[in-house]
Image (tube, rainbow, N blue to C red):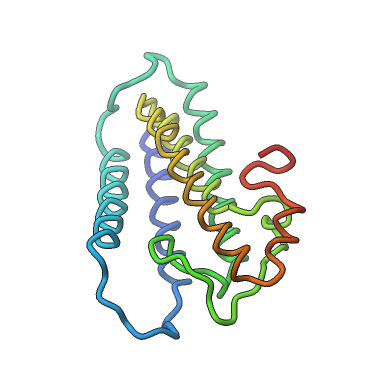
Amino acid sequence: MILLRFYLLFGLIAHKVIWEQLRPANDDRPAEKPSAKLLFIKAVKVAILLAIIVQTMVPEILPISSEPLLLRVAGTAIYTIGLLTAIAARVQLGKNWSNIETGRVLDDQEVVSKGVYRFIRHPIYTGDLLLLLGLQLSLNSWLFLGVFVLAPVVMLKAIREEQMLAEELSGYESYRAKTKRFIPYLI
């Protein structure tokens, strides 16, 4: 169990480090004072990340099963798929990325339709949701149900993002017609 917890924690840290390393060094727009909404969203993200990190280090919280071996194996597989999907998608997106909090179309942005993006339009969202679901199942926690609360929020964010991209990014509408939003060939 200690190795599993270490693996989960290492994945979370790797995910965050990769995001920070791939963050654009400079922005082509002047710095703006962050809004209260933006600060709130960032604070919630940090709080969730810290809570999950702590959860990987403490005894089980709201355990599902007294014998969770199969749950842990399935959860670890889901977590790994989610982690790899999110990281691959972020790397493949390259410079065509803006923070979820300030989502906008960049001046030199292009449609990315290779790699994971060949199959789904939002592999980072999909990967992150799978990562959270798998993590909670690996930790044998009923907190996995929180993913089903978070999923509609992510869906609405993706829909708004797609509307903006369709209006402002050349070629996005054609790309959208060829791919699914979250699950290849299904959704």
Q: Residue 71 or 119: which is nearer the viewer?
A: 119
- Seen in the picture, residue 79 relative to 171 is either above or below; the reply is above
Query: Quadrant of residue 140 in the image?
Result: top left
Q: Residue furthest left?
A: 36
Locate the N terminus and report the quarter of the image it occupies: top left
Q: Residue furthest front?
A: 167
Q: Is residue 119 left or right of residue 43?
A: right
Image coordinates for residue 172, horizontal then vertical, percent: 68, 64
Tell me which corner region of the image, top left, top right, bottom left or bottom right, holds residue 28: bottom left
Nearest to the observer: residue 168 or residue 157: 168
Q: Residue 60 appears at what percent x and percent y? A: 29, 27
- The image position of residue 110, as x and y in percent, is 65, 74
Instruction: Looking at the picture, tell me which residue is in the foreground, 178 or 148.
Output: 178
Residue sitting at x 59%, y 70%? 168
166 in relation to 50, above or below: below
Q: Which quadrant, please, contains the C terminus? A: top right
Tell me what residue is drawn at x 37 percent, y 14 percent: 66
**In this image, 105 relative to 118: left or right?**
left
Residue at left offset 48%, top offset 35%: 134
Q: Residue at horizontal 44%, vertical 72%? A: 23
Q: In this view of the protein, which residue sits in the foreground, 25 or 80?
A: 25
Residue 174 as seen in the image, left or right of residue 52: right
Give the percent coordinates (x, y) of residue 111. Answer: 67, 68
Total marks shown come to: 0
Going by the picture, which residue comes out furthest to the top?
66
Q: As drawn, is 10 to the left or to the right of 48?
A: right
